[in-house]
Image: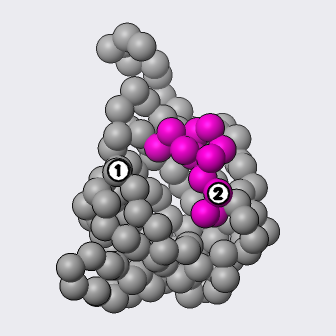
Amino acid sequence: MSDTVTGAINWDEVPLERVNDSMQRRIVTGQHMTIARIYFEDGFTVPMHSHHNEQITQVVKGQMRFLLGGETEQELLLGPGDVLVIPPHVPHQATCIGAVEEIDMWSPRRDDWLDGSDHYLRSGSGS
C-alpha cells in the first residue's frame, strides 16, 4: 500500500454490515488503523474479550456501561461525547443502554473484523 491519500470517504457511502440481530457497523480501514461507526440496539452486550489492538471508543448517542478487567476491575458509564482509551490486551465488555451509536478506532487495524473471524460478536445477540 502506498502513502498516497486515497480521498475523502463519507460514512453514508460505506456499506452497512449487519453483524447480528442487534448490531450493525460501517468499517473504514487503512494500512495501520481501523475505524468503525457502530449501531447497537438497547440491551446489547458486547461479550468480554481482549485483543492486541489499542482501542479508542467515542459514544455519539445513547449510553454504554463498560466493564474493564485486568489488574483491577473497573466499571465506567459513557454517554454522548465521552471517549475511552482501552490499552492492548485489557479484557473489556460493554452493555448498551438505549439505542447506541458509537465510533471505535484501533491500531493496529482489526484484521478479524475485515476477514469475518470476529466470532465473539457474530454468535447470537450478545445479550
Q: Which mark is residue 70?
A: none
> Gap in Å between the C-alphas at discs 2 and 1?
17 Å
The quadrant the N terminus occupies is top left
Up-down relation of residue 67 to residue 112 (above or below):
below
Amino acid type at mark 2:
His
- Neighbours of disc 1 within 10 Å: few (<14), some (14-19), many (20+): some
Choose top left, top right, bottom left or bottom right for residue 57: bottom left
Q: Residue at x 37, y 71 (%)?
A: 91
Q: Secondary structure at mark 1?
A: loop
Is residue 27 visible to the viewer in this orientation of the structure?
Answer: no
Horizontal and vertical percent position of residue 52: 34, 51
Check residue 118 for magenta coloring.
yes
Up-down relation of residue 73 to residue 84 (above or below):
below
The region drawn magenta spans 110-121
Amino acid type at mark 1:
Asn
Residue under label 2: 119
Choose top left, top right, bottom left or bottom right for residue 11: top right
Horizontal and vertical percent position of residue 77: 38, 87
Of the pair 100 and 45, the residue shown nearer to us: 45
Choose top left, top right, bottom left or bottom right for residue 98: bottom right
Horizontal and vertical percent position of residue 84: 30, 69
Is residue 110 visible to the viewer in this orientation of the structure?
Answer: yes
The tag earlier along the polypeptide, 2 or 1, is 1
Residue under label 1: 53
Of the pair 40 and 45, the residue shown nearer to us: 45
Q: Residue at x 41, y 81 (%)?
A: 66
Magenta stretch, overall SS: helix
Of the pair 84 and 62, the residue shown nearer to us: 84
Horizontal side of 86 relative to 78 (left or right) equals: left
Of badges 2 and 1, the one in the foreground is 2
